[in-house]
Image (cartoon, helix red, strand yellow):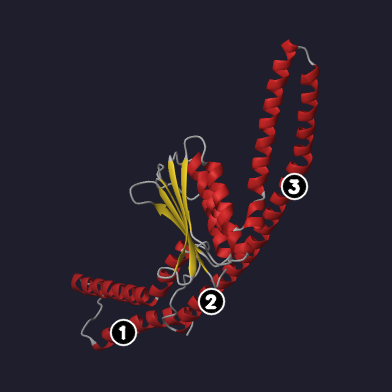
């Protein structure tokens, strides 16, 4: 039965009950209306309205549950579905809503995969151009500066050496940026070596990064890239935004909490999230985790700071 007919029949039942009571009851209506009769009719009308409100409220309760689910659903936290209960019309509506969520999550995962794939390709291209074009140009400038410094008089030689040192620092910075854009060590030496190199890069400016890395099975290129990018984003947040002084990065294989899975845990002693809404960085990490069927969680750490955990089941990887 449709929602329209269900509400119609509820109202019809209330009105029919009121008519029967008027027909079989001792109530009469005089002209002019007597005060006692007016009070009885007013009481009957109030009883009708209350009964109608209660019946409609009970009948529409599944809609309230569906409305709450619609306002709280988050596609970055998939898997939440409503239990199909209620009458035929409401059950069909809930099933349709669950089917719509399945389609939206699948479409979002596919579009996110395409976007992240294009992003990685663009990073690869930019890193290649930085290394090949700008890197080679600065290397030629360094050689030219060395030749000029050898031929320059002593008063100018010191200044040329200073320019040469600044150019060398710029070349080192460009190479460092290129390595972050395209982690060649991840492709060549694997995830463990790439994470060691990543933590070494962040051990500057008063930030101390400790790592405990267990030997993990082969996870596949996509899963290892997601683990590396999540670690990179967490370390960047700790260094730039959290004001942390100490960070611990742990990569371990778990068999109790995550059956036959790998867990990456990054904990810092910074100022924490502080109830701030999730930014683009955290949303990006959640989207990357969804691509490989992993579970990403971030929140306050014990004793202060922030703790991020990425759990990657081996079968998903």
Quick one: SS at disc 1? helix
Q: In which quarter of the image is residue 120?
A: bottom right
Residue depicted at 70% across the width and 35% down the height: 171
Look at the picture and state if 224 lies above or below 29: above
- Residues at marks 1 and 2, CA–CA distance in whole angstroms: 36 Å
- Residue contact between numbered discs 1 and 3, judged by CB atoms under 8 Å: no
Pick the front one: 202 or 188: 188
Q: Which mark is residue 128?
A: 3
Instruction: Name the residue carrying label 2.
Output: 96
Q: Which mark is residue 234?
A: none
For label 1, the crowd category at 10 Å Cα-Cα, with few meaning under 14, some 14 to 19 and many 20 or more, is: few
Disc 2, SS: helix
Which of pointers 1 and 3 lies earlier in the amino acid sequence?
1
Q: Earlier in the sequence, mark 3 or mark 2?
A: 2
Residue under the point 56% across and 71% down = 316
Looking at the rendered image, the disc whose residue lies closer to the viewer, 1 or 3, is 3
> Measured along the vertical axis of the image, is residue 139 above or below residue 269?
above
Whether residue 284 is visible, yes or no, is no
Instruction: Write down the residue under mark 1.
Output: 17
């Amino acid at each position: 039965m449709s929602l329209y007919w269900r509400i119609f029949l509820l109202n019809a039942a209330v009105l029919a009950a009121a008519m029967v009571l008027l027909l079989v009851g001792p109530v009469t209506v005089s002209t002019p209306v007597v005060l006692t009769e007016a009070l009885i009719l007013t009481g009957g009308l109030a009883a009708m309205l209350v009964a109608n409100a209660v019946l409609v409220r009970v009948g529409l309760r599944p809609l309230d549950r569906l409305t709450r689910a619609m306002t709280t659903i988050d596609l970055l936290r998939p898997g939440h579905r409503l239990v199909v209960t209620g009458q035929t019309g409401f059950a069909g509506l809930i099933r349709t809503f669950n089917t719509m969520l399945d389609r939206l999550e699948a479409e979002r995962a596919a579009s996110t995969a395409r976007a992240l794939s294009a992003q990685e390709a663009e990073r690869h291209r930019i890193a290649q151009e930085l290394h090949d074009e700008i890197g080679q140009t600065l290397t030629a400038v360094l050689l030219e500066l060395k030749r000029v410094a050898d031929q320059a008089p002593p008063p100018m030689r010191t200044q040329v050496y200073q320019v040469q040192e600044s150019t060398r620092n710029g070349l080192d910075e460009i190479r460092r940026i290129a390595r972050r854009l395209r982690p060649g060590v991840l492709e060549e030496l694997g995830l463990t070596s790439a994470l060691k190199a990543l933590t070494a890069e962040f051990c500057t400016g008063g930030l101390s990064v400790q790592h405990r890395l267990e030997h993990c099975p082969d996870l596949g290129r996509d899963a290892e890239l997601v683990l590396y990018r999540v670690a990179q984003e967490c370390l960047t947040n700790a260094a730039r935004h959290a004001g942390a002084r100490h960070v611990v990065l742990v990569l371990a294989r778990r068999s109790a909490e995550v059956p036959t899975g790998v867990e990456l845990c990054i904990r810092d002693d910074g100022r924490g999230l502080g109830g701030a809404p999730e930014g683009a960085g955290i949303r990006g990490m959640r989207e990357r985790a969804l691509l490989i069927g992993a579970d990403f969680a971030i929140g306050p750490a014990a004793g202060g700071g922030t703790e991020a955990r990425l759990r990657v089941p081996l079968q998903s990887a």
